[in-house]
Image (cartoon, rainbow, N blue to C red):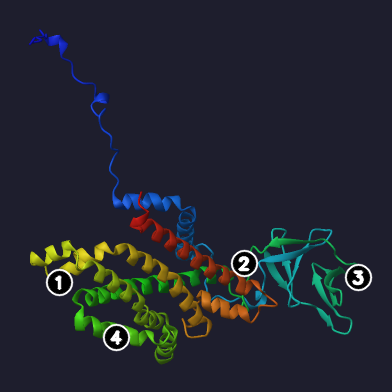
């Protein structure tokens, strides 16, 4: 047998270049569960867009009223029912007028700012005209079958009419002359506050109640779940209406009444998750090592079913917004003049033919917010589903 021998020298040994040290590695960097969830959530474009929409609604509701320069209860009766887009009538010498739908004439500028209301010096119902004195000249307001028009003193109609955005009130005014934009933004505060607080109470009460019922099982589970089923036998809206009638209007009352009935579905969800997990080996190991039941529920069981819980809590926000809007719509929500989207919808319903914008804007706000949270919840559900991991 031939023995090979080599005479190695010191310069025959060289350190391995850093780039070749991982040449045999076949695995990539590890990805944690929550990073994988975030990556899958980013792939859902509709869910990502809903996050930005929710953040925009939150920022506008929280900070928007500070920049409008108006309060939600300040009234300007001469400018009541003023639409967001107004028609400015301009004479040949540059005078600008705004004709209110309720036959009031205002001086305005070319940008859409209404500056002063004019009082007629003469009213002639038989001749169907009002006469105004503006800087020593007469301006006629004529109304008849052809509509309402401004005319010079000799009856020549002023035909230079253009539509501009209402710079005094960007979204118009309601029937009492209050700024619709400020009320809409402030109403977002109320509606979102109710939704988030009710959702948090749903999360904590439902998770704790369902976790206890599922972990202990037996008679404890039977009694606790029969209580839930008895309450669920009647729609929760009935309970909210009865409690609001008893307690009266107010934001604190509606928070209490909605929180008292909103946790039922969450408790059943958590109970089912706990029942499927409590017989697994890691729970039996925790019991054998003497871990207390409350610690097992809070540190072992609930963290392992956090995905469905987060999705359910997120999906409960649109339901809370809809319930609050409905209660305010029927007059059992927050007390006027404090606005919410439901109150704004109720107030706009009476003027749906003459001023449809008064119900249009709060309806859009409610729909957009509910769609955003629904899409966000759908995206979370898909991202947290372990069966979709690749």
Which is more foreground, mark 1 or mark 2? 1
Which is more foreground, mark 1 or mark 4? 4
Q: Which of disc 2 and disc 3 is earlier in sequence?
A: 3
Give the residue drawn at x 24%, y 75%.
214
How far apart in space, not on screen, are marks 1 and 4 (Cα)?
Answer: 22 Å
Would you say the residues marked 1 and 2 are in contact, meaning their CB atoms lie under 8 Å apart?
no
Q: Is residue 204 visible?
A: no
Secondary structure beneath dot 1 equals helix
Above/below status of 366 relative to 127:
above
64 or 189, which lies in front?
189
203 or 272, which lies in front?
272
Which residue has dot 1 on it? 293
- For residue 155, the mark is 3
Which is more foreground, mark 2 or mark 4? 4
Which residue has dot 4 on it? 226
- For residue 169, the mark is 2
* Residue 132 placement, left or right of 292: right
How far apart in space, not on screen, are marks 4 and 3 (Cα)?
Answer: 80 Å
How far apart in space, not on screen, are marks 1 and 3 (Cα)?
Answer: 90 Å
Give the residue drawn at x 64%, y 62%.
167
């Amino acid at each position: 047998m031939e023995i090979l021998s080599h005479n190695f020298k010191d310069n025959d040994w060289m350190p391995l270049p850093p780039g070749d040290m991982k040449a045999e590695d076949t695995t990539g960097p590890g990805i944690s569960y929550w990073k994988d969830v975030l990556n899958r959530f980013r792939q859902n474009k509709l869910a990502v867009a809903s996050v930005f929409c929710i953040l925009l609604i939150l920022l506008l509701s929280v900070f928007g009223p500070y920049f409008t320069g108006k309060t939600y209860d300040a009234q300007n009766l001469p400018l009541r029912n003023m639409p967001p887009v107004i028609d400015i009538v301009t004479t040949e010498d540059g005078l600008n007028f705004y004709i209110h739908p309720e036959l009031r004439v205002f001086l305005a500028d070319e940008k859409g700012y209404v500056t002063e209301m004019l009082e007629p010096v003469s009213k002639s119902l038989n001749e169907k005209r009002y006469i105004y004195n503006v800087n020593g000249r007469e301006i006629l307001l004529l109304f008849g079958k052809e509509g309402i028009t401004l005319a010079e003193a000799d009856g020549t109609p002023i035909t230079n009419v253009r539509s501009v955005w209402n710079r005094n009130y960007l979204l118009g005014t309601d029937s009492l002359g209050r700024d619709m934009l400020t009320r809409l933004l402030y109403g977002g505060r109320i509606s979102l506050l109710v939704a988030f607080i009710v959702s948090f109470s749903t999360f904590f009460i439902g998770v704790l109640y369902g976790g206890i019922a599922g972990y202990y099982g037996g008679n404890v589970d039977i009694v606790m779940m029969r209580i839930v089923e008895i309450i669920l036998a009647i729609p929760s809206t009935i309970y909210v209406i009865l409690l609001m009638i008893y307690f009266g209007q107010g934001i604190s009352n509606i928070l209490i009444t909605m929180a008292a009935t909103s946790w039922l579905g969450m408790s059943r969800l958590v109970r089912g998750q706990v029942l499927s997990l409590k017989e697994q080996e890691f729970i039996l190991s925790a019991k054998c090592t003497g871990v207390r039941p409350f610690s097992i529920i809070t540190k072992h069981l609930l963290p392992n079913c956090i995905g469905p819980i987060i999705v359910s809590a997120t999906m409960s926000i649109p339901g809370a917004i809809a319930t609050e809007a409905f209660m305010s719509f029927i007059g059992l929500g927050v007390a006027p003049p404090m606005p919410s989207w439901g109150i704004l919808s109720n107030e706009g319903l009476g003027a749906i033919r003459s001023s449809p914008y008064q119900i249009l804007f709060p309806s859009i706000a409610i729909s957009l917010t509910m769609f955003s949270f629904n899409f966000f919840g759908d995206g979370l559900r898909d991202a947290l589903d372990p069966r979709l991991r690749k």
